[in-house]
Image: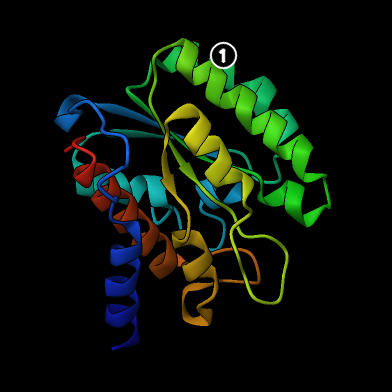
Amino acid sequence: MLPRVALSFLLLLGLSACSDPSLPYLGPDGRILAFGDSLTVGKGAARDEDYPAQLAKLCGCEVVNAGISGEQTAEGRKRLPALLDEMQPDLLILLEGGNDILRGVPSQQIQDNLQQMLLDAQSMAVPVLLIAVPQKQVLLQSAPFYKTLAKQHDSLLMDDVLRGLLSSPALKSDAVHLNAAGYQQLATAIYHKLKEAGAF
């Protein structure tokens, strides 16, 4: 029963508000670039149980998993432009910053790196769904700079979904990674967010 209740709660969190940016229709021919660290790789779950693989099943389009475990935003900032150029995606899902937060990288530095990634996507007319990562606190709260960046760049934002998932022991494989059920709920919340924005 708990997973169903949690899923309903997370879906409500994932739904767009009226003021959220809209997306061009992607449909089954769309290509999504899922960029990030071990949460994108799917650490803590079996192969094909990562959120990009599960999102692909939901949307019926191509979702490229471009996650690298342990990556920090400074490394991601260098890696992203070539990937955008190579993949020519219709949408970028950006889920990065967790390793910086765990290692105590200053917030302004993380924000600057993420901002450059958003600018790189913007320069290629690639819309972005930005997923906020929680700060390192007893009571998880999303780092506030994600909301700032989304507003500055008119990007879609999922501010509370990852925080909610990581607050549930039943959905985690360890302290900072999800399990298969957690990644499934993340994929479902992302799909509903994109659908509300007009992508599907």
Q: Is residue 92 left or right of residue 36?
A: left
Number of callouts: 1
Q: Secondary structure at mark 1?
A: helix
Q: Which residue is mark 1?
A: 82
Q: Is residue 56 left or right of residue 96?
A: left
Taking the spot 39% from the left edge, 58% from the top edge, the residue there is 186
Q: Position of residue 181 (x, y in %)?
A: 39, 69
Which of the image's four quarters has the N terminus?
bottom left
Return the x and y of residue 140 as percentages of the image width and height: 62, 70
Outermost residue toward the bottom in this view: 1
Residue in the picture at 56% in, 71% down: 173
For this orientation, the residue located farthest to the front is 19
Residue 48 visible in the shown view: yes
Residue at the (31%, 35%) spot, across then down: 21
The answer to which quarter of the image holds residue 180 is: bottom left
Q: Position of residue 70 (x, y in %)?
A: 71, 46
Circle 1 Cα neighbour tier, 10 Å, few/some/many (<14 / 14–19 / ≥20):
few
When the figure is inspected, residue 122 is found, relative to residue 146, above or below; the finding is above
The answer to which of 172 and 136 lies nearer the viewer is 136
Q: Residue at x 57, y 41 (%)?
A: 148
Q: In this image, 44 relative to 181: left or right?
A: right
Q: How is the image coloured?
A: rainbow
Q: Nearer the viewer, residue 56 or 107?
A: 107
Q: Amino acid at mark 1?
A: Ala
